[in-house]
Amino acid sequence: MVQSRATPPETPSAPWAPGPPPLDAADEPLRDVDAERAVLGACMGNARVIDAVRHTLGEGAFYRPAHETVWQTLLALHSEGKPTDPIVLVDYLRARGEVDRVGGAVYMHQLCDAVPSVSGAEYYAQIVREKADLRRLRTCALRTVHLTQEPGADPDTIRSGVETDMRAERELALASGQGRLSRFIVDGWRFVTESGAAQTPLWGTPEQTLWGSGESLMIVGPPGVGKTTLAHQVVLARLGLQETVLNMPVAPCRRVLYLAMDRPTQIAKAMARRVSPEHEAVLRDRLCVWQGPLPATIDKEPDLLADLAAAHQADTIVIDSLKDAVSTMVDDALAVAFHNARMRALRNGVEVLELHHQRKGTAEAPRGQRPTLDRVYGSTWFTSGAGSVLFVAGEAGDPAVTLHHLKHVTGEVGPLQVIHDHERGTTAVEPTLDPLAILRAHPGGMTTRDLAAALSGETTPGRADMEKARRKLEILVKAGLAKKTEGTAGGSGGGQQARYHVSNLHLAAS
């Protein structure tokens, strides 16, 4: 077959030829040209990706010489503070007479379009680096075989040479920052500033975050209390079909992969309550659903979550439910293995939402009493590795349930008394327990103690209830929904006598 001018040679040979030489079958497991294209395309689309992958790639990572040339050019452009898009790249290469030897302008634009997901760039770079390491090891091995076939070969000399090669490889990897000991190392400034701490929450506000970027969210509860109903609303909000869930904003994403392993038919029926014909285009393009068991349990294949996301170009994965994704829930070692898989997905920019169950036979706590993490089924390492844990407490089929925030990223949310509309598949906060609604009903304002008494139902609220009420009021003030009038100095209770009122701005908006 004659090769197009838009596609460079497949094998490492002369920079350009009318047709590539035959592929060496031995090279097949030692190269991943698609991963090379993807990582280069990601760097063209977003110059910040270069800093994220350069440490992993190191030197000589690309199988195709043309790809190595493109990579070195991207590094040069980035170091000069220039854009890395295909137009600038082609102009740079043309000025140096190299544009044709890398496949021409058409191929550069094809590379830019080849990336399935920019968020997976570091994962693609890892694949490219691993293949390069295997090729280098094969070269060493072939050299050793050749030495053993020479006349008068001395085993001690060969052994010494192999040991020297291995030591040199190790020293090279340590010195260059490549290999498994350095693959995910970043400098301290990048770790602090790019860790996601300053990113917009996926669900909630910076002060009260239900789901933080780069940290998994687990929704737990007994059967029939609306875990799936709540999760579906978050999914649809991630798809841009609604803006808030439980009055808290949800950040949109590009694509969701829903692992419907636990009764997919019922999951489909539940989601059908929330969608209508005008949603068809969005659901076809941005939501994909895996039905039934996975090809392997996640604890057995630690790359499975990340691979599934990359295969379906998803930046959000929903696991419904956790018990169907792991071999057994009570084994600590398997729980740690699952967490490693979870972290690999998160490290690749894939957000993770997990649905889970409480322990069987666990007695329900009195209504309104906060449950504890030990009521979550399975090893404690499942919840230990989660970023946020929500517990839905109530009776099966009950429209009124309580949402507890057992593990939180920033400030605790709730407890919230929520109402499920099972016909429409929606969930709303009970208005009589909404702090803003309560404040609005008191034109003369409220103290922290007043709100704590209203929320807890106790005439004399405890210290914890008082602190929760204070945080809720301060959040309203920060959001511009309420204003604060300081109390009189020396008065009983001191700062607790400050009064909060609904702001004029909120009243005007209402």
Image: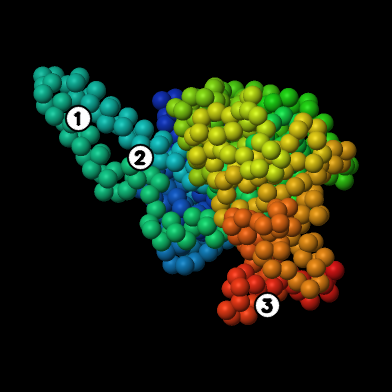
Residue 490 left/right relative to 52: right
Which of the two residues, 314 or 84, is positioned nearer the viewer here? 314
- Residue that mark 1 sits on: 162
Asked if residue 45 is positioned above or below residue 361 in the image, the reply reads below
Name the residue located 41 percent from the left edge and 25 percent from the top edge: 26
What x and y, as percent, mark residue 273?
A: 85, 38
Q: CA distance from mark 2 to mark 1?
A: 21 Å
Name the residue located 69 percent from the left edge and 38 percent from the top edge: 366
User: Which mark is first along the chain, 1 or 2?
Assistant: 1
- Residue that mark 3 sits on: 485
Q: CA distance from mark 3 to mark 2?
A: 57 Å
What's under tag 1, amino acid-wise? Answer: Val
Asked if residue 226 is positioned above or below residue 250 in the image, the reply reads above
What x and y, as percent, mark residue 188?
A: 38, 58
Residue 178 left/right relative to 34: left
Q: Which label number is shown at residue 180?
A: 2
What x and y, as percent, mark residue 402?
A: 72, 43
Name the residue located 65 percent from the left edge and 72 percent from the top edge: 497
Mark 2 Cα within 10 Å, few/some/many (few <14, many 20+)? few
